[in-house]
Image (tube, rainbow, N blue to C red):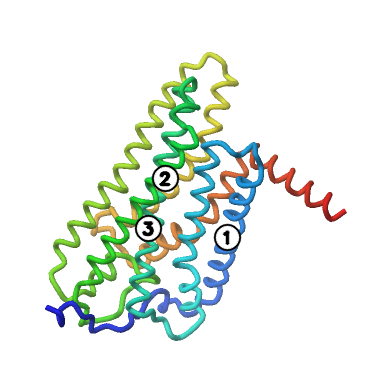
Amino acid sequence: MKEENQSCIIEIIFVGFSDFRAMRVPLSGLILIFYLVALLGNSLILILSSMDSALHTPMYFFLHTLSLLEIGYTFAIVPKTLEHLLSERQTISFVGCGVQMYFFILFGITECCLLSVMAYDRYLAICKPLQYSRLMSPRECFQLASGSWAIGILVAFGQSVSIFTLPFCGPNRISHFFCDVLPVLRLATADTFKNEVAIAAVTVVFIAVPFLLILSSYVLIIATILTMPAAESRRKAFSTCSSHLIVVSLFYGTTTFTYIRPKSVYSLNSDRFLSLLYTVVIPAFNPIIYSLRNKEIKSAFTKAVGRRKTLLG
């Protein structure tokens, strides 16, 4: 039993984008730009939401947490991807692969849960405004955010341990640019049926169910908004939800097509570029979406710039 649990593989080779040799330098430059935008944009939201008292509300507390997740999400994948694009050695240690997968699952599952919490927050703000301050007290916000993190940590630990305790004594090449769950699982030299069932269960419970909760929240939100007599009230209500809706659509649109689409439409190239979208591009767009459509963040940024000019002057 001891020998069966020991891994024969000491490193994993990424096929990644090796078949696009002519594109590797421009692709790495493009990924680097999106990565820097994601880091700067999300860091800016973290700073502004911490410094400006006007942003010390439940909505911005959850946005603060989302930005933290996006930074972790990209940091877990992008630096290694850039290293592989710019060097001939496209490998990762077996342990390093396990660590990368753990953080990929952690941040991904936590974000799914947090997006549903943010939808619940908007539901309470619009549908139950008189009870909002009681139901979304600082204590409740902390518990909801902590619960999202706890679910992500537990799921990531369970999935990573169940996969990396399997024997890996065969091929060590995966047709991907990071240690995604299914490509790594295919390398295991053992029956993986139980693991596949567990992955399917996680997909349903922690990805599909939060998405259904988000849809349910917005059905109720839209129904409430349409009953508002004043056009200005309807406009403001839609405005507070629009950024979150766009972010949810982008995140779930790409992840759903990547992990739930039929095998008949599977393509290696589309899989890799879809993965680039949700690991690199979307984390860069999210802070832009929230900033461009949000007067409070614009105001906080203007005040922060004004204070800096005053100090320098």
Element at badge 3? helix
- The kind of residue on which mark 3 rests is Leu
Residue at position x 26%, y 46% in the image? 205
Q: Which residue is mark 1?
A: 39
Residue at position x 26%, y 61% in the image? 159
> Which comes before the other along the chain, label 3 or label 2?
3
Element at badge 1? helix
Q: Which residue is mark 2?
A: 114
Element at badge 2? helix
Residue at position x 30%, y 48% in the image? 206
**Foreground of the two, 313 or 239:** 313
Where residue 280 appears, as percent x and y from the top left, is: 49, 61
Based on the displayed image, in which of its 4 quarters is residue 49 positioned?
Answer: top right
- The kind of residue on which mark 2 rests is Leu
Based on the displayed image, in which of its 4 quarters is residue 121 positioned?
Answer: top left
**Foreground of the two, 268 or 168:** 168
Residue at position x 57%, y 71% in the image? 29
Q: Which residue is mark 3?
A: 106
Q: Are marks 2 and 1 in contact (CB under 8 Å)?
A: no
